[in-house]
Image: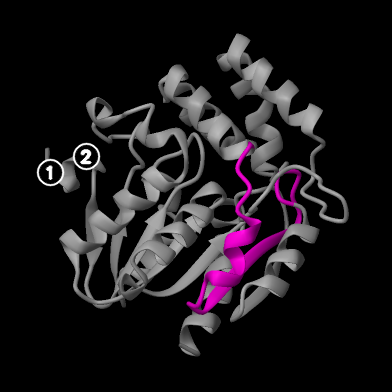
Amino acid sequence: MSVLNRNNVKLVGSGPPMLFLHGFGCDQNMWRLMAPHFSESFTCILVDLVGSGGSDLSAYSPAKYATLDGYAADVCEVLAEVTTAPAICVGHSVSAMIGLLANLRCPDAFLAQVMVGPSPCYINDGDYVGGFEREDIEGLLETLESNYLGWSSNMAPAIMGAPDQPELARELTSSFCRTDPEIAKQFARVTFLSDLRSELPKLQAPTLILQCSEDVIAPRSVGEYMQKRIPDCTLRIIENVGHCPHLSAPSASTAAMEQFIARL
């Protein structure tokens, strides 16, 4: 099985490499409002995480993907296959943490990290405000286990936000519903129960965090926490309601990324 087929890798444009990693329940199509812009100056590397989109579902291993490290290993393999130059990694939500882990695993493969709506830990812990109590997460996962399609149709509008663009919530619902339910259930558990706070100080690559002003999944306090703990980190707040500014506020997100990239 080739790495490129496994992750449904697509290369668009020319120039230095820019890797795009989608979030939970999504696929590479979620970058369609951003990647074409950057493809004018970069080679955009679009991938589907194993179990998502057009990836090879036969490559999915519950053991390998029992932690985010399995996905991070895949990212390093993809980059080794398609480029020798260090890449800018653009990761949404859980894939921001996958990008971080990949950066720690193969640091020479990365020039910088752009994290869109990241969270190293979703569960409140003492002074740390992740946005959810543990019982909230357990309840969310139990609902997902018992009624995945119902969970998808209820959660997608809250995750997307952008109440003035209801078509985006419908798109996210459809994306969730296309994902294999068993794979989605495991990925959700791995995502929402992960705690990578101890890894943040190890990241040496320049990092940009794009955080929405109102986000029910990754509140602003999480972005502020991460900025203080990643050594070379810039936090930009996008005035936007929701967890997907690359879809609901693409112009503001692109502008913030361009300012960051210009300083690299």
Q: Distance of mark 1 from mark 2, alpha carbons?
A: 6 Å
Q: What residue do we see at 33% from left, 66% from top?
A: 106
259 over 61 or under it: above or below: below
Is residue 103 rendered magenta in the image? Answer: no
Whole-percent x and y of residue 99?
A: 45, 59
Residue identified by numbered label 2: 6
Q: Position of residue 218 (x, y in %)?
A: 71, 50
> Which residue is label 1 attached to?
2
> The disc labelled 1 sits on which kind of residue?
Ser
Question: Which amino acid type is shown beneath numbered disc 2?
Answer: Arg
Q: Residue at x 65, y 23 (%)?
A: 141
- Single out the residue that lies furthest toward the right: 127
Above/below status of 196 relative to 63: below
In front: 113, or 239?
Answer: 113
Secondary structure at badge 1 equals loop
Quarter residue 42 falls in: bottom left
Magenta segment range?
A: 193-218
